[in-house]
Amino acid sequence: MSQPAPVDPTATSAWTRLTELAGDWKPDLRAWFAAEPDRVERFTYTAGDLLVDLSKGLVTDDVLAALVGLAEEAGLAARRDAMFAGEHINVSEDRAVLHTALRLPRDASLVVDGQDVVKQVHEVLERVYDFAQKVRSGTWTGVTGRRITTVINIGIGGSDLGPVMAYEALAPYHQDGLECRFISNIDPTDAATTLAGLDPASTLFIVSSKTFGTLETLTNARVCRAWLLDGLRSVGAIGADDTAAAEAVEKHFVAVSTALDKVKAFGIDPDNAFGFWDWVGGRYSVDSAIGTSLVVAIGPERFAEFLAGFHTIDEHFRTTDVAHNVPVLMGLLNIWYTNFLGAGSHVVLPYSQLLHRFPAYLQQLTMESNGKGVRWDGSPVTTDTGEVFWGEPGTNGQHAFYQLIHQGTRLIPADFIGFANPAYPTEDGDTDVHELLLANFLAQTRALAFGKTADEVRAEGTPEQVVPARVFTGNRPTTSIFASELTPAVLGQLVALYEHITFTEGAVWGIDSFDQWGVELGKQLAQQVGPALAGDEDALADQDASTRAMIGHYRELRRR
Ligand code: F6P
C-alpha cells in the first residue's frame, strides 16, 4: 500500500499555536514549581518499569496541549499503526519496518507480504538459542576440541553498536569464563588490539552484517580468518591444506545476515548462519540474530527478557493515548526544543557506567534515522530535522562538558538516566557510593532547572566582579528517566523508548526514518580513492586538488 503524502507540520494549526507560544516564551521553572504544587505529578509518567519525569522540562500545559495537537494533525497514530501492520513505510527502499515483530511473543501472529513473520522470528531465535547454549555449555568446541572462551563479533554500525552497548550494559549477567569482544573499524588497529593475547583454538567469530557486503566487516572477517588459520597452523594444530582450513573455519566462524548466499560464498557453513529480514533496519537489529553475541554472553532466558522489555514499550507506544504516551511525549518535546526553542543537540547522560556505550548507540539510532533533508515523498523538509545526539556517563561528563550545558549560550535538552539499585553495591566507610552517584544526578538536574541568581551568589560573599561568572540562569531542560535496576528487560525498554521517540520525531517531520542514503556517497568515493592511494596514477588524476595533495603527503610519509 503506497503511503499517504506527509503532512507539512508547519502548515498545521498546532504549529501556528506553538509558534505563538514560542514568541512570548519566558520559561521560569522556579515560578512554575512554586505556582503548581502538582507539577511533578502532572508531568510524571510511567511506561513499563520506567518512570519518566518531564517536570523539569520547558513545558507548560499549553505547550503540551499544542504538541499533542501537532501529533494528531501530523497523522502520527496512522503512521505508527502502518508500521506495526507491516506497511512499506520505508518508501525509498520499499520495505516494511518491523523491528517490533522481533519481540512479539511466540503465540502472536503477524502476516506481512504473505508470510507469518512471528513464526520466522521464533524459528531463528530457537536456532540462535541452541547455538548459544552449545557455546555456553562447552558442547561447541573449536577445531582442536578446546572449549570456546572468547567470542568476537565482527560488524559495524547496527551490526556492532547494539551488541556492544547491550553486552557492556548487561555485564552483571555475563557467564563467567566466556568473554565477548567486538571488532568494527577498518582501522587495522581494531583487529590487532582486539585479537592480541587470544588463543585461536578457543576463539569463535560471529560475522554480523545485514548485507554481508560491508567493506569493513568483510575485510575484518578475512583478517580474522587469516589470524585463525595462521595461529592454528603455527602450533601444528591443523594441516596446511584447504580441507583443514575449511574445517577450522566451520568450527570458528558463524554468521548473521540477511544475505545467506554471500555467507556461504565466504566459506561459512549455512548451518552456522542465522538469518534476519530486510524489514529490520541495521540500527534496529540488536533484538534480531544480530544480538547472537549477547545471547552467548547472557543466555537465552535473559535475552528473552530483553525482548520482552522491548515488547512492553511497543505495546505502550501502540496502545496508549498521545497525552500519556511516553515516547510520543518525549519525541514531541524534542520537536518543541528543536523547532521552536532553537536547540540543535540533545545530550543523553546515563548515571550508570554500564550504559557507557548507550549514547554512541543512540547516535546511530537517532541521527541515521532522522538526519534527512527530504520527506518520504521526495519533497524538501519544511523545518529543521535531526538533532545531534551525544553524551557520556555521569559523572564523567560533569567534569568535562557540563560547563557548557549549565552556562553556555546554547539550549541543550538533557536526558538523565538512573537506577535505584546499583549492579555492584559498594560502601566507602559509611557512605553508599551509589548514593554519591545519584546525589550527582539529582543535583545536576536541580542546578540546570533552578540555577543560582546573582543575589544568591552575592549572599555567599562572592566579590562583585566575579558574580556574573558564578550566576546560573537555570531553565535548562532535563528529563529524568528512572528505574529500579538495569535488568535485561529494563534495557530493552530503554532502547525501545528511544526507537519510538525517534519514530515520533520522524513522523512529524514527514521523513523516512528507515533509510540511510547519506552514508553511500562516501563509500562510493572510497572505492575510487583507494586505488589512488595505492599508486594508480589515473585514479590520482581523477581526484580533486585537495585530495591529490593529501595523497601526495601520504605517499611521502608512508613507511613500508
Ligand atoms: O553504512 C551504514 C550502514 O548501512 C548501517 O545502516 C548499518 O547498520 C551498517 O552500515 C552495517 O551494515 P551491514 O550490517 O549490512 O554490514
Image: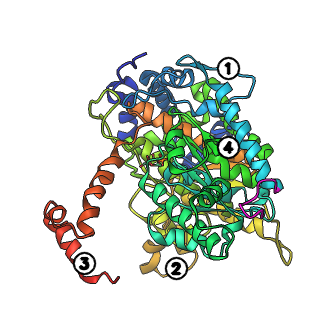
Residue 526 in the image: above or below residue 501? below
Determine which of the numbered discs, if any, sits on residue 219 in the image.
none
Q: What element carries label 1?
A: loop
Categorize mark 1 by other alpha carbons within 10 Å: few (<14), some (14-19), many (20+): some
Percent x, y of residue 287: 63, 41
Determine which of the numbered discs, if any, sits on residue 462 in the image.
2
Instruction: Identify residue type, mark 3.
Output: Arg
The dominant secondary structure in magenta is loop
Instruction: Identify residue type, mark 1.
Output: Ser
Determine which of the numbered discs, if any, sits on residue 555 in the image.
3
Pick whichever of labels 3 and 2 is earlier in the sequence.
2
Residue 149 in the image: above or below residue 522? below
Determine which of the numbered discs, if any, sits on residue 492 in the image.
4
Asked if residue 485 can be seen in this view, the reply is no
Residues in magenta? 138-146
Asked if residue 480 can be seen in this view, the reply is yes
- Between marks 3 and 1, how big is the CA–CA gap? 59 Å
Instruction: Identify residue type, mark 2.
Output: Thr
- Residue position marked by numbered label 1 in the rendering: 109
Percent x, y of residue 557: 28, 83
Pick whichever of labels 4 and 1 is earlier in the sequence.
1
- Between marks 2 and 1, how big is the CA–CA gap? 67 Å
Q: Answer with the quarter of the image where residue 93 lies.
A: top left
Mark whose residue sits in front, 3 or 2: 3
22 and 34: which is toward the camera: 22
- Between marks 4 and 3, how big is the CA–CA gap? 48 Å
